[in-house]
Image: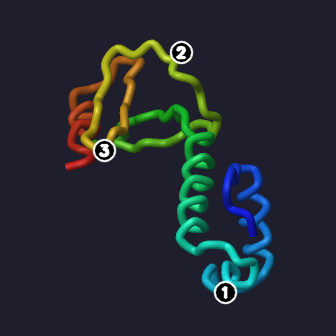
């Protein structure tokens, strides 16, 4: 199989064929004469592109009842960064950013700050 000038769209078709084949990647690559290393390279690119397209902001609500803090997502809708005008931001070491756009208790804020520790 010709592998030069391969595009992501072309690989999507190859990837779909592999998923339908019910074989291992190694067997599939041998069958279609495709370099296994390149298959993994393109597979990572494909999955990264899918993850990037699903990126966004997910609004969540925090509430405190009986001394317990709960976090919930009122909707699964993702919003753009322009939709939020935060009072403050918490940036974690792993790159996750939490934007707070309303006042909250110190206990709630402390819970968010310590979330990744």
Helix, strand or loop for disc 1 = helix
- Residue found at x 40% / y 16%: 86
Helix, strand or loop for disc 2 = helix
Name which quarter of the figure residue 68 lies in: top left
Query: Would you name the residue on which mark 2 appears?
Result: 82
Measured along the vertical axis of the image, is residue 8 above or below residue 37? Answer: above
| Residue 73 image offset from top left, x and y in percent | 54, 40
Of mark 1 and mark 3, the one earlier in the sequence is: 1
Which is more toward the observer, 73 or 91? 91
Name which quarter of the figure residue 76 lies in: top right
Q: Quadrant of the N terminus?
A: bottom right
| Residue 104 image offset from top left, x and y in percent | 32, 24
Q: CA distance from mark 2 to mark 1?
A: 47 Å
User: Which class describes the residues within 10 Å of circle 1: few (<14), some (14-19), or many (20+)?
Assistant: some
Q: CA distance from mark 1 to mark 3?
A: 36 Å
| Residue 95 image offset from top left, x and y in percent | 33, 39
Of mark 2 and mark 3, the one earlier in the sequence is: 2
Which is more toward the observer, 58 or 24? 24
Query: Would you name the residue on which mark 3 appears?
Result: 94
Measured along the vertical axis of the image, is residue 47 above or below residue 54? Answer: below
Of mark 2 and mark 1, the one earlier in the sequence is: 1
For the image, the number of numbered tags is: 3
- Residue found at x 69% / y 53%: 6
Which is more toward the observer, 95 or 101? 95
Query: Would you name the residue on which mark 1 appears?
Result: 27
Measured along the vertical axis of the image, is residue 39 above or below residue 63? Answer: below
Q: CA distance from mark 2 to mark 3?
A: 22 Å
């Amino acid at each position: 199989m010709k592998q030069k000038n391969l595009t992501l769209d072309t690989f999507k078709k190859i990837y779909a064929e592999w998923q339908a084949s019910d074989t291992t990647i190694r067997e599939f690559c041998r069958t279609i004469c495709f370099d296994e290393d390149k298959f993994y390279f393109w597979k990572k690119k494909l999955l990264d592109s899918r993850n990037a397209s699903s990126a966004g902001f997910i609004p969540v609500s925090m509430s405190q009842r009986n001394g317990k803090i709960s976090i919930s997502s009122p909707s699964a809708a993702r919003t753009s960064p322009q939709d939020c005008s935060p009072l403050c931001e918490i940036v974690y070491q792993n790159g996750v950013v939490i934007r707070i756009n309303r006042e909250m208790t110190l206990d709630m804020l402390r819970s968010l700050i310590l979330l990744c520790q």
